[in-house]
Amino acid sequence: MPSPDKIKTILVIGAGTMGHGIAELAAVAGYKVFLADINNDIIKNGLEKIKWSLSKLSEKGSLKESVDSIMSRIVPVVNTDPQGNFTKEFENAIKESDMFIEAIPERLDLKQALFKFIDKNRKQDTIMATNTSSLPITEIASATSSPELVVGMHFFNPPPLMPLVEIIKGEKTSDNTVSVTYQIAKNFGKQPVIVKKDVPGFIANRVLARFLNTACWLAYKGLYSILEIDSAVRYSLNFPMGAFELADYSGIDVFYFVNKAMTERGFKMTHCPLFEQKFNSKELGMKSGKGFYEYPKPGAYVRP
Ligand code: NAI
């Protein structure tokens, strides 16, 4: 049976917006971390961002050890070859790891293929966690031989700063898997909550989806400009970011996939077409340099 003390090495899969932040948390908490992605440039970029973030924490005196010593625990892994096959290097990282946290795009087919491969190559009793925002854990777990070891571990963006982690129990997730994952989130310095109902979008994203969709319709119908809506949200409701600012920051593709996954599974919402239009024209927000706003340096956050 998994136990928190047996977990020494964590494999984070996906080094994008969420994955590199999760890897940072794990390394700061003292774990050896494999950080895997299909794209070597994304891994390099992720490692640079982790280093930058750690140096800020170090300046504030929030770290117990040097930035270099934390960085030395993170091992990059390119997990597919140019033909899209999983690499030997990735297989070895799986064999060495005691826990997995997946943060690849919000698509069931991709996640199921990855979980199937991990399941085939992992040690016994290793927890397979997913950072999915909306897909039922039960559906992802169905690709494995041990659904009792599959759990939702839903961080918020940016993981090093946002305290909440939703720990989601799929239909077959064991209580032990939930409690070990809860403890790991605590070890990462987070405030976990256990979500017992595996409904698409869980708690926070069901609320968020309506908020973003409502803002989107106001703009799409031409009632208010994007800047007017974001100003109202930020300065009147006192939210730290406007609705469109948040979509750009988190990734328009993420919300597009999340909304789709939720409505396909019975969540009642009439999609505002703006998200799909942006998605189709590859204007994904900060990560692509343009979304609802423009970003002079892709990936760099500048307040609109
Ligand atoms: P992202 O697009 O920034 O990063 C995903 C990364 O996965 C990319 O670097 C891509 O190259 C890589 N990738 C694709 N297929 C892969 C594979 N088979 N193996 C390894 N790497 C692969 O996406 P983001 O925003 O980090 O989202 C990842 C997951 O986290 C999604 O499930 C999303 O719903 C969830 N999430 C996103 C949040 C956000 O604010 N962006 C917040 C909370 C959860």
Image (cartoon, rainbow, N blue to C red):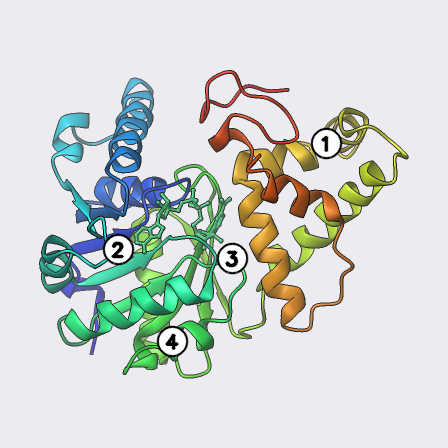
Dot 3 falls on a residue whose secondary structure is loop
Kindly report which numbered mark, 2 or 1, lies closer to the viewer in this rendering: 2
Tell me what residue is drawn at x 76 percent, y 49 percent: 272
**What amino acid type is highlighted by mark number 1?**
Asn
- Separation (CA) of disc 1 from disc 3: 24 Å
Disc 3: CA contacts within 10 A as few (<14), some (14-19) or many (>=20) = many
Q: Disc 1 or 4, which lies upstream in sequence?
A: 4
Residue 133, label in figure: 3
Q: Specify whether tag 3 is near ligand 1 (CB below 8 Å).
A: yes
- Identified by mark 4, the residue type is Ala
Q: Which residue is mark 1?
A: 238
> Nearer the N terminus, badge 4 or badge 2?
2
Q: Please determine whether, in this image, residue 141 is positioned above or below residue 186.
A: below
Residue occupied by mark 2? 84
Residue 90, horizontal then vertical, whole percent: 15, 55
- In the rendering, at what x and y percent does residue 176 appear? 31, 77
